[in-house]
Image: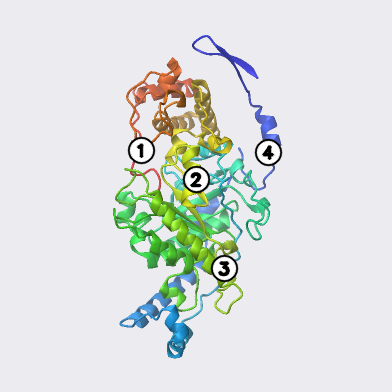
Amino acid sequence: MTERELEDGRKELVLVEDEERKNAAMPLVEGGAEGGVFNSISTEQKVDLMKKRRKTPKSDAYTTWLDETSKQLEIHNHGRRFADENNVEANGEARDEVEDRRAQFKEPPFLPSEKRRLYFGSETPVLAPLTTQGNLPFRRLCVELGAQFTYSEMAMSLPIVQGHKGEWALMKAHQSEVLPPTIKPNQGVVKDYDHSRDLKFGVQISANKPWQALKATEVMTALCPHLRVVDLNCGCPIDLVYRDGAGSALLEHPSKLEKILRGMNAVSNEVPVSAKIRMGTKDNSPTALKLIERLVLGGPEFTEIGQGPAGVAAITLHGRSRQQRYTREADWSYISECAALIRRLNERSDDLTDTIREPDDRLQAPGRRVYFLGNGDCYSHEDYYRAIGESGVDTVMIARGALMKPWIFEEIQAGQYLDKSASERLSIVEKFAKYGLNAWGSDEHGVGTTRRFLLELLSFTHRYIPIGLLEHLPPRIQDRPPAYKGRNELETLLASDNYKDWIKISEMFLGPAHKDFKFEPKHKSNSYEIEG
């Protein structure tokens, strides 16, 4: 402990961390690079990818099968009717027709490997994949504050396959992220769940073609041994991504989306596959209910040729449309409808167990259960537990709430609001700066990178209003309070929306910025790009 004097003359005790003792106490995980960083690949491996020397036999074989099967399905589906399940059971001719049709199709070249079991519960708050903000230092900070699961920033599949350095840098995880979650589920909650094999860090990718997603998944799971899950972004609203046919554009092509996820599941070895979606692309026209049913049970194109479920382990629903972006409140009533649907579909899957209609176990979700996560407008522990209790989701994925106050995970664990003092909030900023220098280096380039990402973080944290100043709880991000004066000068400085004040804060830990240095936040108030 050390004593620190505040600006108003008061003194307080501050806990001083001993990094050597802290690192010594952290369990040893094999395969890490210098500084406790995992999932780093060598320059030689990147060159092999760039020069196409690294083969992806699983992806090539499965993509060929998908293409051939799709062409055959188009021929068979032209002008014919679908026989629903009831007709197939009641009508022998229809059943024979389906069996004949299945016999005409080739089986996939291989079945998916058995997947590692996952667990999501009320005690496992999740940090969302965040473009720009979801960097390694920020994720490390959130894990330290109580986040149980984290995701990389969204990575583009094609640059991954081509060995681009910048995209592979997104795969890096801190040692604290490759350890098992600190909370174990109750005994028997998940069949065959092995807590010791679980970890916190997953990656999110974006793709507009099946072969890109498959190849990216195959090389990532082969070269990065510390991945909890590979998540497909189906919700990014950025125009550039949407026009390219990726992100939320996949919501308009559910059959293509299912092909991508099936293929990813087939080539990902033991790593489970998940998807993050939105309600739909247009306001007042939600499509997530139909899409969820397809992803859990399998679409008609695949079920009628005997392929069963898509094998998705978890689905996250952001309660907004693409058109809505990040404006207006998330629709948790619709999320609740989808949660109820998933519960029914999971029960239907249980009913098929030990019957002749039971799909191959390797085609099903790990543990025969698809987890469902809600996302949108979670800014306090009250929002978190209300969402779980009233909406029926397994857990909540937190995005902007964590950017405004990273200690939201502490509040969730404590079950109460934490009125952080200005000095406590500044210590969190200091910790981010320290972790940034550890990750990006303390040379001129490393300091510049750390400063830029620190300023991006401050562009969100300044919007936090101290609990002690609020008249009504809980706070809402859509509310815009009038200018206010903090309880001391430091609190007022932390609340400033002037980028020059943010630069002053960064100079406390990173030294003086260049006199001509300017900063414009990449993500503004209702950012289009923050997360999918």
Query: 529 left or right of 199?
Result: left
Q: Nearer the viewer, mark 4 or mark 3?
A: 3
Residue 413 x %, y %: 58, 38
Real-space Cα separation, disc 3 to disc 2, in angstroms: 41 Å
The residue under the point 57% across, 64% down is 368
Which of pointers 3 and 2 lies earlier in the amino acid sequence?
2
Which of pointers 1 and 3 lies earlier in the amino acid sequence?
3
Examine the rendering and report whether any part of residue 168 can be seen: no
- 507 above or below 106? above
- 377 above or below 207? above
The residue under the point 39% across, 51% down is 333
Q: Secondary structure at mark 4?
A: loop
Q: Nearer the viewer, mark 1 or mark 3?
A: 3
User: Dot 1 corresponds to which residue?
Assistant: 523
Viewer-proximal residue among 190 and 100: 190
Q: Secondary structure at mark 1?
A: loop
Which of pointers 4 and 3 lies earlier in the amino acid sequence?
4
Q: Nearer the viewer, mark 2 or mark 1?
A: 1
Examine the rendering and report whether any part of residue 470 can be seen: yes
User: Dot 3 corresponds to which residue?
Assistant: 350
Real-space Cα separation, disc 2 to disc 4, in angstroms: 24 Å
Query: 77 left or right of 454?
Result: left
- Mark 3 belongs to which amino acid? Asp
Q: Which mark is residue 26?
A: 4
